[in-house]
Image (cartoon, helix red, strand yellow):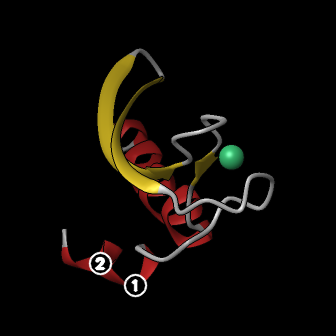
Amino acid sequence: MAEFVSYEDILCSRCRVRMELARADFTYLGHNFHTEVMRCPKCGAVYIPEELAEGKIADAETALEDK
Ligand SMILES: [Zn+2]
């Protein structure tokens, strides 16, 4: 996914190791979604870009509530 290219060098703030791209599944309002997030291979911390957390989930919420 092209928009994640600039995140490939993110380091875990705790472990100082490079985070890896991982698939994350989550459930929101009874619907299942998946996205790709940066995850620390050592401690499992997940980095979610602010625009993703606010933008994509807000879009999903709007789409679901529009019905
Ligand atoms: Zn870590």
Which kind of residue does numbered mark 1 sit on?
Ser
| SS for callout 1 | helix
Residue found 60% across the figure and 35% down from its top:
44
Q: Position of residue 42 (x, y in %)?
A: 60, 39
Q: Mark 2 points at which residue?
A: 3
Nearer to me, 37 or 67: 37
Residue 60: image x %, image y %? 38, 46
Q: Is residue 28 above or below residue 64?
A: above
Q: Is residue 53 above or below residue 5?
A: above
* Left or right: residue 60 compared with residue 15: left
Q: Which residue is drawn at 51% across and 41% down?
A: 41
Quarter of the image for residue 35 reads: top left
Tell me whether the residue at label 1 lies in contact with that at label 2, contact meaning CB atoms closer than 8 angstroms.
yes
The image position of residue 28, as x and y in percent, is 47, 26
Tell me the amino acid under the disc marked 2: Glu
Give the labeled residue for mark 1.
6
**Pointer 2: residues within 10 angstroms few (<14), some, or many (20+)?**
few
Q: Which of 65 and 11 is in front in this view?
A: 11
Which residue is rendered at x = 31% and y = 32% of the image?
A: 33
The answer to whether residue 67 of the structure is visible from this angle is: no
The reply to whether residue 13 is in sight is yes
Quarter of the figure with the N terminus: bottom left
Q: Which residue is drawn at 56% across and 56% down?
A: 48
Q: Seen from this angle, which residue lies furthest right?
A: 14
The answer to whether the residue bearing label 2 lies less than 8 angstroms from the nearest atom of ligand 1 is no
